[in-house]
């Protein structure tokens, strides 16, 4: 039995089609920039392959 290597060096590459995330990104950036906000420390997490790195890029 051969075990397939899960490492994929293409992670984080910008996909050719993106969902419209402008509103979400704008809200996140504005919330992080506020001086008196609980969002100064932000954690982006989720299941592998859902676009966390692409979102942060």
Image: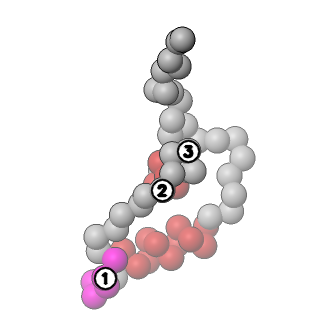
Residue 17 to residue 3: above or below: below
Foreground label between 3 and 1: 3
Q: Where is residue 28 in the image (x, y as percent from the top left)?
A: 46, 72
State the residue at coordinates (47%, 48%).
Answer: 53
Is most of the magenta stretch helix, strand or loop?
Answer: loop
Dividing the picture into quadrants, the one containing residue 16 is top right
Q: Where is residue 17 in the image (x, y as percent from the top left)?
A: 72, 47
Q: Are marks 2 and 3 in contact (CB under 8 Å)?
A: no
Mark positioned earlier in the residue sequence (3 or 1) = 1
Can residue 37 be found in the magenta stretch?
yes
**Mark 1 lies on residue:** 38
**Mark 2 lies on residue:** 46
In the picture, measured across the screen, residue 32 lies left or right of residue 27, that is left
Q: What stretch is highlighted in magenta?
A: 35-39
In the picture, measured across the screen, residue 45 lies left or right of residue 26, that is left
Rounded to the nearest whole Å, what is the CA distance between mark 3 and mark 1? 27 Å
Foreground label between 1 and 2: 2
| Quadrant containing the N terminus in the rendered view | top right
State the residue at coordinates (50%, 17%).
Answer: 3
**Mark 3 lies on residue:** 49
Residue 16 to residue 24: above or below: above
Q: Is mark 1 on a helix, strand or loop?
A: loop
> Is residue 54 at least partly visible in the picture?
no
């Amino acid at each position: 039995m051969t075990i397939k290597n899960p490492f994929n060096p293409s992670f984080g590459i910008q996909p050719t089609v993106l969902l419209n995330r402008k509103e979400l990104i704008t809200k996140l950036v504005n919330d992080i920039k506020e001086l008196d906000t609980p969002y100064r420390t932000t954690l982006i997490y989720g299941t592998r392959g859902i676009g966390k790195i692409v979102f942060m890029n």
